[in-house]
Amino acid sequence: MVFGILMIIFGFSHLMKSDYFLSKKTRILLGEEEFQSYQKGLVFPNLFTGTLIICMTIVEKLEILQTSTFIALYIILAIIPIILLIANNKINTGRYWFWVNDFK
């Protein structure tokens, strides 16, 4: 649950345009305009992931679902923010993964 709260903090940090959780290298590589767009694209995936983790922790503690159903639901719901993060990277950096072919 702590990780979920941390992800929500990350999401609100990006929403408020704070670059505290992003490296200075990211700002330099993307430039100011692309950086703002990249950061805006991180808001929903982080908030969704944090909410998902908190909700699924509660569901797990209450033992509402069977284990196989719980795992399948968790995987299906986790795919959404992963796809959004990959799309955000592709739109703003031209790469699916930000760290591939390290910028120099």
Image (cartoon, rainbow, N blue to C red):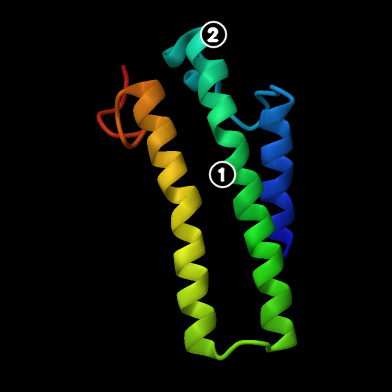
Residue 56 in which image quadrant: bottom right
- Tag 1 secondary structure: helix
Q: Which residue position is annotated with label 1? A: 45
- Tag 2 secondary structure: helix
Which residue is at a point 68% across and 87% down the rendered structure image?
A: 64
Percent of width and height locating residue 33: 52, 9
Labels 1 and 2: the sequence-earlier one: 2
Amino acid at dot 2: Glu
Residue 62 in which image quadrant: bottom right
Percent of width and height locating residue 24: 55, 19
Total label count? Answer: 2
Q: Is residue 30 left or right of residue 36?
A: left
Percent of width and height locating residue 30: 44, 15
Q: Is residue 7 above or below residue 77?
A: above
Percent of width and height locating residue 18: 70, 23
Amino acid at dot 1: Pro
Which residue is at a point 68% across and 40% down the rendered structure image?
A: 10
Q: Is residue 1 above or below residue 64?
A: above
Q: Is residue 86 left or right of residue 66?
A: left
Residue 1 in which image quadrant: bottom right
Which residue is at a point 74% across and 54% down the rendered structure image?
A: 5
Label 2 environment density (alpha carbons within 10 Å; few <14, some 14–19, many ≥20): few
Observer-side mark, 1 or 2, equals 1
**Extreme residue in the left direction:** 101
Q: Is residue 80 above or below residue 25?
A: below
Which residue is at a point 71% across and 47% down the rendered structure image?
A: 8
User: Spatial distance from mark 1 to mark 2, Cα to Cα?
Assistant: 21 Å
Q: Is residue 2 left or right of residue 52?
A: right
Q: Which quadrant: the C terminus?
A: top left
| Disc marking residue 29 | none
Q: Which residue position is annotated with label 2? A: 32
